[in-house]
Image: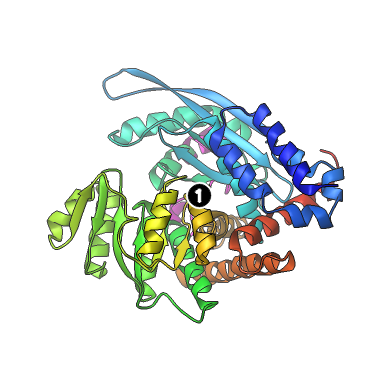
Amino acid sequence: MDIHAYTADFLEAQEKKDPGQKVFLQAVKEVVSTLHPVLEQNPVYIKEKILERLVEPERIISFRVPWQDDKGEIHVNRGYRVQFNSAIGPYKGGIRFHTSVTQDSLKFLAFEQTFKNSLTTLPLGGGKGGSDFDARGKSDGEVMRFCHSFMNELYRHIGYHTDVPAGDLGCGAREIGYMYGQYKKLTDVFTGTFTGKKPNWGGSLLRPEATGYGVAYFTQNMLATKNDSVKGKTCIVSGTGNVGVHAIEKLTELGGKVVGFMDYDGSVYDKDGVDAEKLAFLKDLVFVRRGSLKEYVKKFPKAEFRPGKKTWDIPCNIACPTACENELHGDDAKTLLKNGCKCVCEGSNMPCTPEAIEAFQAAGILYSPGKASNAGGVAVSGLEMTQNSMRLYWTREEVDQYLHRIMNSIHNSCLEAAEMYGMKGNYMAGANIAGFKKVADSMLDQGLV
């Protein structure tokens, strides 16, 4: 069989089945394009229609979310949960509250999550959920009423052994708390059905930091293959959410100099780099006051705020996109390469467009896909589930050791899979292949279900 013809026909058929679902189709194409040698050596995947089954979610739940603001006005949002694949464990993936949330975006995220969770070595399936609700500018009472309404439907479809949600963009510890409180009231059980909880009622230490720390550890691992390290390198990060801020923190701890980062309003260029005082201010600004980076330059006037601009034109050695999908385009990639970037480590899901990835790979620089390098968050979520089951709390040091070990394992799995199938050093191919094979083989073991 001509594998290239088979995958071309498969992708064409998928486009006809899911017209208009651009980011989901982009994610499917990115994975399938790296699987040709795997399919050639394992024709059973074709015979058993693994690809055709794998791209269909096992279940999609869609529901309305009515809620009332502080003035008594009624609003209606859409809620979703995409339960994509449970071949290796219960569905696991975050809940995203953002105006960009659609069924397309959540299918893409749940598809990616399936392979990401596979790479962690933990028994977790893939899922994702959310709503087009925007928590920015809302009072705590408004956010609580929305979260309770959201949970009034979702609680029927989740559970400790079925589907374990977590936080994501726009959904942090506050939102997890409100949702869990309503879940507990409706079900009358206290189990580890959610992760990302606060430590005083079942959460894991280091969970907020885990994704960002994992990005830094993966970056360090990639550079080590070139007998290099983060120490002394100039770094830029895109988002300043949970992932971005903690990536800044760990890159700085590893000896890097973070000079650029951004939020909704624009970017900061701080030539002197982020130090302990600046990091403390940034954490308070983002996590406590939920303010704008405009305030950063008022506090530290040597830094420059650039309204509406991204960070990609800032000269750097290491770039970590941590904001959202397709934020780094082909032209941005060319600018990064021109300015000396030697390593791109994704901290969000599919932040680089296909044109950007092609540019990085053609230039031969180190590049890792988010499904590998941002898996630290779900890894510690899995560790939180373990602690809940054991009724134990681990110290920060213990969790960090597990996290570091898992990120090392993911890094090694990517390199080994890539080399096994003739694509040595290709982290994207290695991540896709290693993640795919575990899920595909599990599906074969369990039969046609």
Towards the viewer: 44 or 90: 44
190 in magenta: yes
Using residue 417 as the reference point, say whether residue 165 is left or right of it.
Answer: left
Q: Is residue 401 above or below residue 186?
A: below
Q: Residues within 10 Å of mark 1 (few under 14, many from 20)?
A: some
Q: Is residue 44 above or below residue 79?
A: below
Using residue 329 as the reference point, say whether residue 110 is left or right of it.
Answer: right
Helix or strand or loop: what does disc 1 sit on? helix
Dot 1 amino acid type: Glu
426 in magenta: no
Using residue 264 as the reference point, say whether residue 410 is left or right of it.
Answer: right
Please give the range of residues in magenta.
180-205
Return the residue at label 1.
355
State the image quarter where residue 386 is shown.
Answer: bottom right
Q: Is residue 69 visible?
A: yes
Residue at the image point whose x is 69% and y is 34% from the top:
12
